[in-house]
Amino acid sequence: MIELVKDKQKSNCHDCGVNPEEKHIEGCDVERCTICKGQSLSCDCDSPRETWTGIAYEKELLYCEENNLWVKWNDGWVRCSKDDDGATHDLNAAVKIIMSHE
């Protein structure tokens, strides 16, 4: 069964170690740029530090849940129902859609 965002346990950032609701530390490879949405570590934007939510890919996971984007492995990733055995969030689809709207 899929673990939904509302049921996930919040934790410290696995790279820089900050607590949920704190700003990432400079050089963190998890932090996303608040302007271009790329990895802050490798972008040149002059953006403010991102706040760690406590859940990796939270925005994308929520987008999947709200828009019914699920996949499972079947000799490659295939679309499926949330209730299918092996179903998981389709993060690749979510990122493509989110990025196309920003």
Image: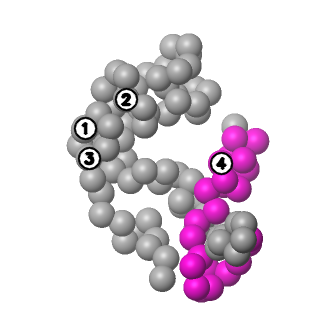
Callout 1: helix, strand or loop? loop
Q: Are marks 4 and 2 in contact (CB under 8 Å)?
A: no
Circle 3 is placed at which residue position? 12
**Dot placed on the residue nearer the N-terminal end, 4 or 1:** 1
Residue ranking furthest to the front: 75
With 77 as the anchor, is 87 left or right in this view? left
Amino acid type at image mark 1: Val
Q: Position of residue 101 (x, y in %)?
A: 74, 42
Q: Position of residue 34 (x, y in %)?
A: 52, 30
Q: Could you say which quadrant of the image residue 30 lies in?
A: top left
Q: CA distance from mark 2 to mark 1?
A: 10 Å
Q: Residue 18's mark? A: 1
**Dot placed on the residue nearer the N-terminal end, 1 or 3:** 3
Circle 2 is placed at which residue position? 28
Q: Position of residue 31 (x, y in %)?
A: 43, 33
Q: Is residue 35 magenta?
A: no
With 54 as the anchor, is 73 left or right in this view? right
Callout 4: helix, strand or loop? helix
Amino acid type at image mark 3: Asn
Callout 2: helix, strand or loop? loop
Q: Residue 2's mark? A: none
Density class for disc 1 (Cα within 10 Å; few <14, some 14-19, many ≥20) is some
Residue at image position (58%, 30%) is 38
Q: Are marks 1 and 3 in contact (CB under 8 Å)?
A: yes
Density class for disc 3 (Cα within 10 Å; few <14, some 14-19, many ≥20) is some
**Dot placed on the residue nearer the N-terminal end, 2 or 1:** 1
